[in-house]
Image: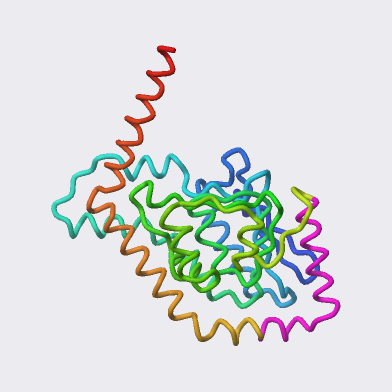
Amino acid sequence: MMASAYTDIKFEIRGRIGIIKFNRPKSLNSFGGNLIADTIAALRELNEHPDTVFTVLTGEGRFFSAGADVKGVAEMSEPATYKNAGEKKLAFLGRFTYATELLRSMIDHRKVLILALNGPAVGGGAAWFPGIADIVLASPTAWLQCPFSALALVPENGSAVSFAQHMGMHRANDFLMFGRKLSAPELLAAGLYNRVFASEGAAFQDEVVAFLEEQLRVNDGESMMEMKRLGNAQVRGSRMLAVVDAVDALAERFVQDAPVRRFEEKRRELEGKSRVKAKI
């Protein structure tokens, strides 16, 4: 596939490094448009590329990703009529298949997957990628937050398991259950990040490429890929099962209308605050 075929990512190959850059900066790289489909296609392309060793996933602009597109969330919250709970469950399961395929594409990716967090990530942007990536490099602005509980949702796409594998169960529970916002230094200390660079923006992304080029200079590419294969072989099944379990739990939350009720509560709360401000 030619790079011009992608509309919501930037795709580039620099020597033995493939780069996928989310490119919806005006929407903080939220998961709208063709961003997810483009990313899956690019991962497939790089998976079969004969020369690359590293696949870098990063973002354009000040955010890595704000997660779910607001319009998409609103559509799922709109009233709909179903014959029974079974039909409703299947409808919501169908809406989440794109995410399952994205996670599978990353879990099964043969190249060393580098997450280069150029900035903050929220919700799915924070939950889907760090626990699956082989190496996580971050700028100092790359804080993470997953406010799933506040929205009556669940930790998405296996993140409850993948985060616990890196941070430990107690830290993962504290982060995901309570929706805590953790800074880059905190995530480095917790074991989720490998390195936090001092640079930001485009300078950070250039530093990531330079760092990886140095690794290729001193290390054998095939050996690094084989290390990845050996390390991931034993956890592949549990990671995919965690993704399937999380998708099922998320669909069940929507069957119960819990997110709809929660969104409505939040809407009324915001309207109330607006009225109070208007009177002042």
Q: Main secondary structure of the magenta part?
A: helix
Residue 239 or residue 144, whichever sits in front: 144
- Identified at 60% across, 44% down, the residue is 24
- Identified at 37% across, 51% down, the residue is 149
Residue 5 or residue 258, whichever sits in front: 258
Instruction: Measuring from the top left, give residue 52's x and y in whole percent.
Output: 73, 73
Instruction: Measuring from the top left, give residue 76's x and y in whole percent.
Output: 33, 45
Dividing the image into 4 quarters, which one contains the N terminus? Answer: bottom right
Instruction: Measuring from the top left, give residue 259's x and y in whole percent.
Output: 31, 47
In the displayed structure, 205 sits above or below 221; it is: above
Q: Quadrant of residue 216?
A: bottom right
How did the renderer colour the structure?
Answer: rainbow
Dividing the image into 4 quarters, which one contains the C terminus? Answer: top left
- Identified at 44% across, 60% down, the residue is 98
- Identified at 35% across, 42% down, the residue is 75
Q: Residue furthest top?
A: 279
Residue 238 or residue 141, whichever sits in front: 141
Residue 100 located left or right of residue 183: left
Q: Tell me where the magenta segment starts and ends, as one range.
A: 203-226
Q: How many marks?
A: 0
Residue 131 located left or right of residue 117: left
Instruction: Measuring from the top left, give residue 104's x and y in whole percent.
Output: 49, 70
Magenta span has 223? Answer: yes
In the displayed structure, 275 sits above or below 31; it is: above
Magenta span has 103? Answer: no
Q: Quadrant of residue 253?
A: bottom left
